[in-house]
Image: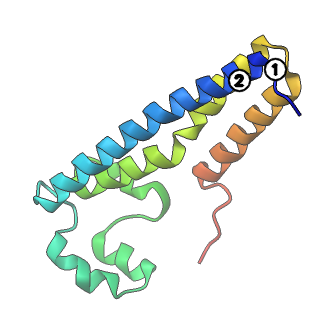
Amino acid sequence: MELKPDALAAQRAYARWLTWGTRLGLGLLVASFAAYVLGLAPHVPIERLPQLWQRPASDLLAATGVRAGWGWAAMLPASDMLVMAAIAILATCSIPCLLVAAIAFGRQRERVLVAVCVMTVAVLALAISGVLAVAH
């Protein structure tokens, strides 16, 4: 199957946004990790990590006072939680890319491809929301 030149434009737009999103996420990850390693206001001191890593996740959360799911977001000024935010940005940077691709496909009247992009964003948003979380 050969792609139309317009479809290549949508792919290039997706790739351009993904490139910048991953660069941003990676830059934030490196900067926030450096801040954490340097000890700049972490929620959990790095010295406690070896003890905490030996515990089950539920015990670790209880010992650190972090709620499960998106609970870390309430503690964002802490440098270790900024690392979590950078990971979240990296994990979700495909969403704006898919929306850009959906717009490009919409201009080309490629309704099926728009629907695929929109449904993918919906599934990702549902997964991110935690609505379908399984209790432990």
Asked if labels 1 and 2 touch by Cβ distance under 8 angstroms, the answer is yes
Residue 43 vertical placement versus 97 (above, below):
below
Residue at image location 34% in from the left, 88% down from the top: 54
The label on residue 109 is: none
Residue at image location 36% in from the left, 78% down from the top: 60
What is the quadrant of residue 2 in the picture? Answer: top right
Disc 2 crowd, CA 10 A, few/some/many (<14, 14-19, 20+): few
Residue at image location 60% in from the left, 55% down from the top: 130
SS of the residue at dot 1? loop
**Left or right of 116, for residue 75:** left
| Residue situated furthest front in the rendering | 2
What is the quadrant of residue 43 in the picture? Answer: bottom left
Report the residue marked by disc 2: 8
**Left or right of 46, for residue 84:** right
Looking at the rendered structure, the kind of residue marked 1 is Lys
The way the protein has been coloured in the rendering is: rainbow
Of residues 100 and 66, the one drawn nearer to the viewer in this rendering: 100
Q: Quadrant of the C terminus?
A: bottom right
